[in-house]
Image: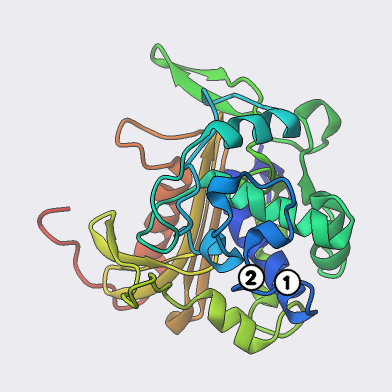
Amino acid sequence: PAAPKTKYQIASTTKPFTATAIMMLVESGKISLDEKAAKYLSNLPAQYSEVTVRQLLTQTSGVNRDLRTGNVDDFTAAEFWKRLAAAPVSFKPGEKWEYSNTGYILLGMVIESVTRKTYGEFLTKRIFKPLGMKDTKYLEPPDKSKNRAIGYDWVENTFRPSPYFSGGFSAGGLVSTVSDIAKWDAALNTEKLLKRSSVEQMWMPAKLSDGKLVNFDFRGEQTSYGFGWFLTSYRGHKIATHGGVVSGFSSQIIRFADDKITIIVNSNGKSGADRIGYAEFLAKSVADTYVPNLLPVSANR
């Protein structure tokens, strides 16, 4: 049975952790947000030479959205660079917003470049161990893990164990528990990891190169994006949120900052026909019960 310490792949809920790690390196002076990513990545293909670290964080870089050829396509670092070199820029950096797993993989490589540690080693040393997140790991295959949920997919009207996919490095490769994610969430309300100003910067809507704020429709709500967080609202309440869906798993964190409530859900099921992850559906169902003074659901939703 599932418990608070049951481990799940959290997929793209990894991205806010990657953004946290980048901001730690910004505070220590090892990274500049408005520096070109090429300064830290000597083998970055020429077509991406103008992309900045900030643009990678805010998903405004124009870096190709996803280099995978399928949902369980685990490629090597060498294959990643080969595919990236062949991938054209989606748009001029800073011109618009587009979600990019590739961009967050590059951020993980920036972390490795400037720290001389692997992505997993850096997060373990600077985030997981200091916060007592004993059950959070990077890239932990099922056969190497205790208390690990088995991922399932809905196939031909039945649940079947899903094929293993790592999740995509720093874009989606963490394994964690709701208890551990709650420790990290609580730390963001203090200065255990980052200065208050850095945390607030992560939750500020991004700007495009023309000065306009990033703004798009997501789940029927006007939405922006910060550093690894969707900034939107749910039934009249402002939220910062991120979720993830990967083979057999889904995950969601929703922060109702004004209400001082955070909802974290991990699921060993992926998504239904409407493409909303099971974890997101469950998290919003919890919000419907516990967040006070929610506005009524509109008739068109």
Q: Residue at x 45, y 45 (%)?
A: 89
Say if 240 sits above or below 10 in the image: below
Helix or strand or loop: what does disc 2 sit on?
loop
Amino acid type at circle 1 is: Ile
The location of residue 240, given as percent across then percent down, is: 46, 69
Q: Quadrant of the N terminus?
A: top right
Relative to 33, 60 lies left or right = left
Where does label 1 land, which residue?
31
The CA distance from mark 2 to mark 1 is 8 Å
| Number of numbered tags placed on the structure image | 2
Q: Return the residue nearer the eye: 293 or 8.
A: 8
Asked whether residue 118 is in view, the answer is: yes
136 over 225 or under it: above or below? above
The location of residue 65, given as percent across then percent down, is: 47, 42
Whether residue 123 is visible? no
Q: Secondary structure at mark 1?
A: loop
- Residue 141 pos. (x, y %): 77, 31
Tag 2 and tag 1, C-beta contact below 8 Å: yes
* Placement of 76 over or under 190, stated as above or below: above
Q: Label 2 neighbourhood size at 10 Å, few (<14), some (14-19), many (20+)?
A: some
Image quadrant of residue 49?
Answer: bottom right
Single out the mark in the foreground, 2 or 1.
2
Residue at image coords 57%, 64%: 52
What residue appears at the point 74 percent right and 59 percent down from the top-left corner? 40
The quadrant holding residue 112 is bottom right
